[in-house]
Image (cartoon, rainbow, N blue to C red):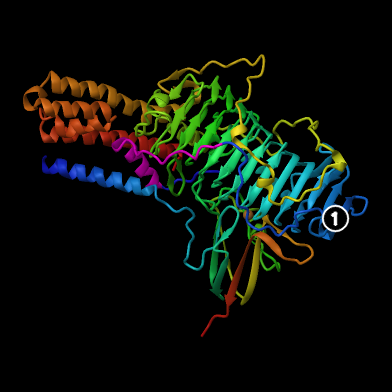
Amino acid sequence: MRMRQRPTSMAAVTLAALIVGVLATFGPGPAAAQDGGPLSVDTPASEAPSAWTGETRNVPDDYPTIQSAVDAADPGDLILIQSGVYKEAVAVTTPGLTLRGVDRNEVILDGEFTRPNGVFVTADGVAVENMTARSYTVNGFFWDGVVGYRGSYLTAVDAWVYGIYAFDSVDGLFEHSYASGSWDAGFYVGQCNPCNAVVTDVVAEFNGLGYSGTNSSTNMFIVNSEWRHNVAGIVPNTLDSELLPPAENVVVAGNYIHHNGETERAPNRAAEWSAYGNGVVLAGVRDTVVRNNLMVNNRSGGVQVVSMIDATLWPSGGNEVRDNVIMGSGRADLLMGGPAEQGSCFAGNDASSSVPGTLELLHNCDGINLPMWYGLATSSDPLGRIAQAHHGQNPQLEHGDAPKPELRFDQLPGGLDAEVVPAVDVFNSLNFDPAALVTPELPDGMEIDSRRATIFGVVLGAGFWPVLFGALMWWVPALVWIIGGFWALIKMWLGSGRESMGTGARAFWTLLVVAIPVLGVLAFALLGNRGWGVGRRLGTVAGGIVVWLAATVGALLVGGVF
Amino acid sequence: MSGLAKTCAAALSALFLAFALSGCGDGVVIDDSGLVMGMFDNRYRPDVLTVTVGDTVEFPNEGNVDHNVIDVDGTFDSRIERGGDHKPDETWAYTFTEPGTFNIYCSLHAVKNNNTGEWTGMVATITVEPGGQ
Ligand SMILES: [Cu+2]
C-alpha cells in the first residue's frame, strides 16, 4: 500500500484539524459479537470439482517441468513435485488442481530475481501445498480472481512485492506458512467483500508489513499467527487504488505480534514506513475487531487506529480493540488519531499507555465513548514517517538482502498420503470458530522493552519529521487548549469578562472552553472575549490560525507529504 | 455577533462541511474521457475501450505497484519503450495507427493458458475503428 495525497484533500484535512478539531459522531456498533460455534457462510459457485480425480501428474518423472504437468492436467488432478530447484514461473489456469511438493524445504521454485510470480493461479479451487518459492520479482504464491483458494505449508522468501497473496478472490485459506523479504507485505489479501478468508498459523518477518489487507472486508480473519521484525505487523487498510473500499468487518485475534519496527532488515516504501513500529494499524478501516492478541516490544505502538488519506479521505470508525495484552511499546500501547475518527473503542486491554492518554476512559466499548476530538495527536506520526520516506530516511534494502530463514519448516502432515482436497467451499470446511481464539501466552524469558523517551505522546528519538509534525499537530493544539483555556477562564471569571457577561454566559463559555478542545478557546477568543474590540479578536484568532497553518502546511510541503 | 464574526463563523462552517463531505468518496475514479485506460491494482480500468485510428491512449499507473502494457500480438510493449515497468504515478501513451482489436495484458499480473492461448488476470481490449469520413 502507498498513500498518494491530493493537495485539496490534504489542505482540507489540516485546516479541519485545527479549526474543527474532528468530525465527531457516535459510530455504528462494532462488528457483531460471536455467539460461539463454527461460522458458516454463503459461498459463490466454484468451477472446480470438489474432489480429487485420483489422477497424479508426477514432476519431473512424467513431466519435466511443473508448468508442463499443469498444462497437461485435467480439473481436479494432483501435481506431485519431487525435490529439486525449479526455475519456473508457474501459471495455473485449470480449476481444482492440487500442487503438492514432496518436501516443503526441498521443493524450491526459484525466480532468480527475474521471474515475476512463483505460482500464479487464475482458476477456482486450486490448492498449493508444501513447497518454497524464492527470489521472485513480484509475488511468491498468487491467486487472482478466483472462488476458493488454499495455500498450506508454503514458504515465500524474497518475493519482492508480496509473499503469499490473494487478490479479488474469495473463500480462501492461508495456513502453516511463512513469508519474508517483501517490501510491501508477507501476506496480502486484497479487494474482496465478503472475503470469507482465514489467515492462520503463519509467520511473517522482515517484510514492510507482515499482513496487508487493502479493501478486504467481511469474514476476513487474521488469527493465531506470529508477526515479528517487520516494519509494521498487521495492517488492514483502505485505498483508492483497488475496488471495494473501505475495508471493514475484519477480525485480528489470537496473534503474537512482536518486535515490529525493524529498521535495517526489512525492505519498505513510504506507505509501509508510515505504519512504522506498530503491531496492528487500522488505516481507514471500519467495524473491525482487534482482540486477544499478545503484542510485545513493538517500537511504536501496539494498536494504532487512524484514518487513511488517499485520493479520498477514509475515516476509521466503529472498531473494537479489546482484551489484548500489550507491553513494551515504544510510543504507547494504544493509539487513536483523527481526523474524522468515528467511534472506535477500547476495552479490557492489558495496556499501560495510550495516545491520547484517555482512550480506555473516554472511548470505552462497554461504557462511555465520547466523540473523538483529538485531531492529529496520533496521525502526526504516520505523516512524519511519510516525510522521512520522502527524504530517503527509511533504510532501504535491495531485493534479496533481507535475512534468510533456515529451511527447516514443518511439513504437510501425512506427506504423500495426505488427503488430496481441491480448494472448494474452503471456509465452511474449516468449521472455523472465532469464539475459540484466545490470547497467546507470553514466552518465558522475554525481556520487555521500556517505553522510549516520549513527551506528551511524541517519541523524541523518532527523528526530525515525526517530532516536527507531532509538535505542530499535537503539541500546539494541545497548548492552545490548555494554556488558552486557562487564559479564557481567568478572563471570564477574574478579568474583564466578569462585567460584560452574565453568570449563564460565563457558565456556557466555561463548558465550551473546557469540553471542546481548541475550538472552544478559539470560539471564546473570537466571540466571547468582549473585553477586546472586534478587530483585535479577529486579528488574534485569524492571525494565530494563519501562522499555524502556514507552518503546518509548509512543513507538510517541505516534507513531501503532498 | 458582528458582521465580521458572522462571516467568519460561516466560513468555518463551510470548511467543516467541506471536510466532512470529503470523507464520502466512492473509491476508484475511472477516467471516462475515452482515451485513458488507468492501471490500478491489479486491473486496467476501464478494461474495454473503443477509439479511432490516430487516437492516443494514455495508460497512467494509478496503482501502488508496478504495471506494464503489452499487446498479445506483439504490436507494442511499453517495457521496451520505457526500459522497464511503469512505476506508480508514471504514465505511458500509445498512438494507434492501424484499425483492429488489440488484446493487452500486464506481464506482472496476467497469465496465459498454454492450452487455449487466452490471457487472464490484468487484461483489457482496445478496439480501434477506422478513421476518416
Ligand atoms: Cu500489473
Quarter of image, res A514: top left
Residue bearing mark 1: A69
Q: Would residue A273 be visible to someone looking at this image?
A: yes
Q: Residue A213: x percent and y percent?
A: 57, 43
Front residue of B78/A345: it is A345
In the drawing, does residue A529 fall left or right of residue B109? left
Q: Name above or below for residue A44 compared with residue A238.
A: below
Quarter of image, res A506: top left
Name, please, the residue furthest toward the bottom.
B133
Range drawn in magenta: A7-35
In the drawing, does residue A20 fall left or right of residue A213? left
Dot 1: few (<14), some (14–19), or many (≥20) neighbours within 10 Å? many
Name, please, the residue furthest toward the right.
A61
SS at mark 1? helix
Q: Quadrant of the C terminus of chain A?
A: top left
Q: Chain of mark 1?
A: A
Q: Residue A73: x percent and y percent?
A: 83, 58
Q: Name above or below for residue B51 compared with residue A402.
A: below
In the drawing, does residue A399 fall left or right of residue A300? right
Q: Residue A460: x percent and y percent?
A: 46, 21
Magenta includes A30? yes
Front residue of B81/A439: it is A439
